[in-house]
Image: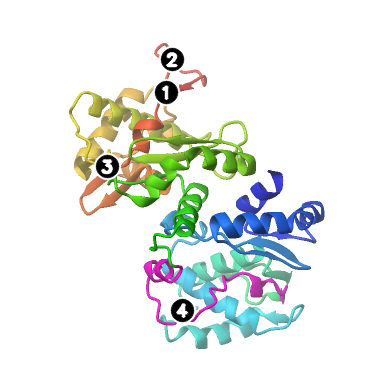
């Protein structure tokens, strides 16, 4: 369990940084490879430097991206950096100015390049910091952070050689691909073979907070219901946790054996979202809101702001000062972004769609709460 969980949680395991775990996974590599190939359709890369499980989801979602990146140009610059590093020898040193000159040439076809613009320098810094944190390059002299404000004119970097293992090798040309759907189609995810259904279901349960469906004829949902005992046993052995199956949704929930990012977590925003979900569920139970065929609820965004306002007014005494006094539009945006990242909600035009998880993961404060930190979740 420990080795597979580590491969799921981490992007990769570097031998020089975690030698003991690296060796343990190496000893179990063939067993793990057999499981991930058959059940998930994933590749396990193991060499003298790293061990990496290439975790490709059934359907790509925004929250699966690089969390430090905030703009599309961050990804564009990062891809150019990967190309730059792959063209250099392991251990080769280079200056920031040398790299920027090459990147500018590579990027001109895709974006306007002007490193004197603060926004582009901030993007560059985010890219460099991610590259450093992932071990793609290391700083021998200087500071990448100070590049943004112009106080650091030159930085000396060294190529670690790990960039060649970063990108996924799809085994085919992707030059004509223009969306995530192209990758999904190329992976034959839309076929109805038993292997395809198995891999889609396992991938969704392992990589996403929820698995939703509307039609009772959904073939993946039918497979999940028919094989639920086996799926619970297999994933329970590999990850711990338990499979929660509902009419239009399934969740793989970790209890004592927690891993990765959590919802709910120990943060005020997480508590706020739990109380908002409780309010939505109450509105459904009181028949003020109606569920559709997929057990989803849809309201206009202005109505959601009103709901958030009611929660703030009622819970202001127990929320911290920041959230208790936050301007409603800002609070609503923060709540919505959090809910989107956990597949609790989605914004479609001027309407907010709340998914079944909203009614499952709810929270409330003790009725006699008078200001202490002690709270309870339902």
Residue underneath mark 1: 318
Question: How far separated are the C-alphas under marks 4 and 2?
Answer: 57 Å
Q: Label 3 vs label 2: CA separation?
A: 36 Å
**Residue 5 inside the magenta-drawn segment:** no
Placement of the N terminus among the 4 image quadrants: top right
From this view, report whether residue 328 is shown above or below residue 81.
Answer: above
SS at badge 4: loop
Q: Secondary structure at mark 3?
A: loop
Q: State the quadrant of the C terminus.
A: top left
Structural distance between the alpha carbons of marks 1 and 2? 8 Å
| Camera-nearest label, 4 or 1 | 4
Say which mark, if any, is on residue 369: 2
The magenta span reads 158-187
Mark 4 is surrounded, within 10 Å at the Cα level, by few (under 14), some (14 to 19) or many (20 or more) other residues, namely few
Residue at x 44%, y 55% (from the top left corner): 197
Q: Disc 4 marks which residue?
A: 174
User: Cβ–Cβ below 8 Å for labels 3 and 1?
Assistant: no
Q: Would you say residue 179 sits in the magenta stretch?
A: yes
Q: Residue at x 42, y 68 (%)?
A: 72
Please state which of the two labelled residues, at mark 3 or mark 2, is closer to the viewer: 3
Q: Earlier in the sequence, mark 3 or mark 2?
A: 3
* Camera-nearest residue between 50 and 100: 50
- Which mark is first along the chain, 1 or 4? 4
Relative to 166, residue 197 above or below: above
> Where does the image place residue 181, in percent across and percent down from the top left?
37, 67
Does residue 8 appear in this view?
yes
List the residue tagged with mark 3. 294
The residue lying at 44 percent from left, 37 percent from top is 269
Q: Earlier in the sequence, mark 3 or mark 1?
A: 3
Q: State the residue at coordinates (31%, 48%).
A: 346
- Look at the numbered disc 1 and give the secondary structure of its residue: loop
């Amino acid at each position: 369990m420990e080795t597979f969980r580590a491969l799921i949680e981490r992007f990769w395991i570097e031998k020089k940084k975690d030698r003991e775990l690296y060796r343990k996974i190496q000893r179990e590599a063939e067993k793990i490879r057999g499981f991930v190939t058959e059940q998930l359709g994933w590749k396990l890369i193991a060499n003298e430097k790293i061990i990496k499980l290439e975790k490709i989801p059934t359907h790509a979602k925004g929250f699966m991206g690089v969390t430090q990146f905030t703009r599309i140009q961050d990804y564009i610059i990062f891809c150019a950096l990967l190309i730059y590093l792959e063209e250099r020898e392991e251990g080769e040193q280079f200056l920031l100015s040398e790299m920027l000159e090459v990147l500018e040439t590579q990027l001109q076809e895709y974006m306007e390049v002007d490193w004197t613009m603060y926004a582009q320098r901030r993007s560059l810094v985010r890219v460099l910091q991610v590259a450093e944190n992932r071990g793609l390059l290391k700083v021998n002299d200087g500071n990448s952070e100070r590049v943004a404000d112009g106080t650091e004119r030159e930085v000396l970097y060294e190529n670690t050689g790990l960039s060649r293992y970063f990108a996924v090798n799809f085994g085919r040309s992707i030059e004509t691909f223009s969306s995530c759907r192209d990758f999904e189609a190329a992976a034959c995810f839309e076929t109805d073979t038993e292997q395809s259904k198995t891999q889609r279901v396992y991938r969704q349960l392992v990589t996403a907070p929820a698995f939703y469906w509307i039609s009772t004829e959904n073939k993946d949902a039918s497979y999940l219901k028919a094989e639920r005992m086996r799926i619970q046993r297999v994933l329970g052995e590999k990850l711990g946790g338990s499979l929660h199956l509902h009419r239009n949704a399934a969740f793989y929930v970790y209890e004592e054996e927690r891993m990765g990012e959590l919802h709910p977590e120990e943060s005020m925003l997480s508590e706020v979202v739990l109380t908002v979900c409780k309010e939505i569920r109450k509105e459904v139970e009181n028949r003020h809101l109606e569920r559709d065929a997929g057990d989803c609820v849809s309201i206009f965004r202005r109505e959601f702001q009103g709901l958030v306002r009611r929660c703030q007014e009622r819970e202001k005494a127990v929320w911290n000062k920041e959230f208790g006094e936050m301007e409603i539009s800002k609070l609503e945006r923060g709540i919505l972004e959090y809910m989107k990242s956990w597949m609790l909600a989605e914004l479609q035009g001027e309407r907010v769609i709340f998914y079944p998880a909203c009614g499952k993961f709810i929270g409330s404060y003790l009725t006699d709460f008078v200001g202490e930190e002690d709270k309870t979740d339902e």
